[in-house]
Image: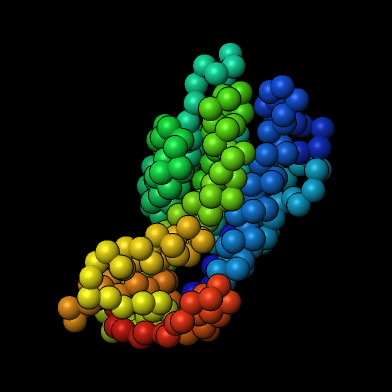
Amino acid sequence: MAYKIMIDSGHGGTDPGAVYNGRQEKDDALRLALAVGDILERNGVNVEYTRTEDIYQTPFEKAQIGNDSGADFFISFHRNSSPSPNQYSGVETLVYDPSGQKLDMAENINGALGELGFRELGVKSRPGLVVLRRTKMPAVLIEAGFINSDEDNQIFDSQFQDVAQAIASAILGTLNEGTVEDSPDSQDIFYRVQVGSFRERAYADKLLYELEDQGFPAFILREDGLYKVQVGAFKNLENAVKMERALRSAGYSTWIDAAPAS
């Protein structure tokens, strides 16, 4: 299925969020949200935004925009803060409750950001937050490091594109895993885009890491004595074709592999 995701940039306008040495949470949130949204769009996801400029919206308005869109997921971007500078550091992702695909997505996001050097603070339940409580679809709120942590800001700034790609890859990977898991029909056909096939695992790993670095939700399938590097698992052939076009635009030779769900 083609997914629609509502991307929310925390705060905005007269509400700067957390502030540190002139740095404002609303600006970091918007910049990261737009970067992640761009990667998701290039990978065939239908993306909408609560805001794309510096305007103020109440949390209730943000939740309503998401509900009115009919999106499948709501993802809100923020930066954390602590009472004293450099008191804490790390990333955490918030959910209404620790269950379902939103939990998988939150854990995947934390893990992906941890690989970039952020301390992983885990997934936490925050049922009182409006954008998690009032949204009708699964929702996650990403705290992309502490804005008053010099360590976190260094990672956020020096590896910004990697941060965006890590989050997008975690989201895409979760969506594609869910597409397979949610199908009750074992005879359903799923379309995967194959990028390479190798007899030695090391070559497959190299291609896998290269694809992941560019934000593609790649994985390795061991089959017929070969390590096959593939991207996505789509029930809709059109979505597989979109992914194949994106990979070809990135310079890869590809073909579409069709197989029944296991």
> Residue 43 vs residue 174: left or right?
right
Q: Quadrant of residue 260?
A: bottom left
Would you place residue 69 above or below residue 163 in this image?
A: below
Q: Quadrant of residue 16?
A: top right
Q: Let me know if residue 9 appears in the view.
A: no
Name which residue lies at 38% across and 67% down: 207
Instruction: Residue 66 in the image: state x and y as whole percent.
Output: 65, 54
Query: Where in the figure is residue 6, as x and y percent of width and height?
Result: 62, 56
Q: Which quadrant: the C terminus?
A: bottom left
Name the residue at 51% across, 61% down.
Answer: 214
Q: Is residue 236 above or below residue 154?
A: below
Q: Nearer the viewer, residue 202 or 40?
A: 202
How many numbered circles are shown? 0
Nearer to us in this view, 117 or 95? 117
Q: Position of residue 233 (x, y in %)?
A: 40, 74
**Quadrant of residue 83 within the rendered picture:** top right
Which is nearer the eye, 205 or 223? 205
The front one of 171 and 218 is 218
Q: Is residue 38 visible?
A: yes
Query: Residue 236 at what x, y percent from top left?
Result: 47, 81
Is residue 131 toward the left or the right of residue 105 in the image? Answer: right
Q: Is residue 106 above or below residue 179?
A: above
